[in-house]
């Protein structure tokens, strides 16, 4: 397959996923007591309340750290080399949108808001859109390389 090119979509996807991952890591570090305070622009102490809420622990683990890891996987898959990788990126990106929407619903029920989680939710939309564009590029790239036909066979070195 031809070498992967770095389109603006791919760069923007990695930038959005990395920003989302860093925001999640910040919350996760607070959740595991590595930070004593959590800055919360626009929402006062809502960030700390949300980070310490019962829904912020998944199977006893800090969801901020899990989300940071998830974003790392999105960054890694943003460099798809095959159609299967592109499909995995696309599926995980749309799952990321759904997980963030569930998080927003939980914050609504809880009655407190976290700037960092709202930020990751807002970033999940361009992540999904850019993932779709990157997957489409892989599809087009494989169609072009497939249309060129298989590479010529190497000589076997036998003479008649």
Image: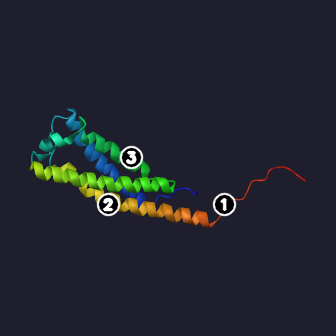
Residue 124 pos. (x, y %)? 29, 56
Q: Which residue is mark 1?
A: 150
Q: Which of these two is toward me, 5 or 28?
A: 28
Q: Is residue 155 left or right of residue 110?
A: right
Q: Position of residue 85 (x, y in %)?
A: 47, 53
The colouring scheme, among rainbow, by chain, secondary structure or one colour, is: rainbow
Report whether 67 appears left or right of 90. Answer: left
Q: Residue 84, image x and y in percent?
A: 48, 54
- Using the rendered image of the protein, determine whether residue 141 is visible from the camera's viewpoint: yes
Q: Which mark is residue 126?
A: 2
Residue at 28%, 40% in the rendered image: 65
Q: Quadrant of residue 64?
A: top left
- Foreground disc of the pair 2, 1: 1
Q: Position of residue 79 (x, y in %)?
A: 46, 53
Which element type, helix, strand or loop, lies under badge 2? helix
Name the side, left or right, on which 150 lies relative to 25. right
The mark nearer the N terminus, 2 or 1, is: 2
SS class, disc 1: loop
Left or right: 131 as drawn, with respect to 41: right
Residue 59's place in the image compared with 100, above or below, is above
How packed mark 3 is, by other alpha carbons closer than 10 Å (few <14, some 14-19, many 20 or more), is: some
Instruction: Estimate the spatial distance between the alpha carbons at disc 3 and disc 2, rounded to whole Å.
Output: 16 Å
Q: Residue at x 18, y 53 (%)?
A: 104
Residue picked out by circle 3? 73
SS for callout 3:
helix
Front position in the image: 112 or 92: 92
């Amino acid at each position: 397959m031809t070498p992967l090119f770095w389109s603006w979509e791919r760069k923007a996807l990695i930038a959005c996923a990395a920003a989302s991952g860093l925001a999640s890591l910040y919350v996760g570090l607070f959740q595991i007591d590595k930070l004593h305070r959590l800055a919360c622009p626009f929402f006062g102490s809502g960030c700390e309340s949300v980070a310490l809420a019962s829904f912020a622990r998944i199977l006893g683990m800090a969801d901020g750290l899990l989300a940071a890891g998830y974003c790392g996987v999105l960054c890694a898959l943003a460099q798809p080399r095959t159609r299967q990788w592109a499909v995995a990126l696309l599926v995980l990106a749309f799952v990321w949108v759904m997980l963030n929407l569930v998080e927003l619903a939980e914050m609504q029920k809880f009655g407190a808001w976290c700037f960092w989680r709202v930020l990751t939710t807002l970033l999940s939309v361009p992540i999904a859109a850019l993932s779709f564009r990157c997957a489409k590029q892989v599809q087009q790239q494989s169609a072009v390389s497939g249309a060129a036909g298989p590479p010529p066979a190497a000589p076997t070195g036998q003479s008649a």
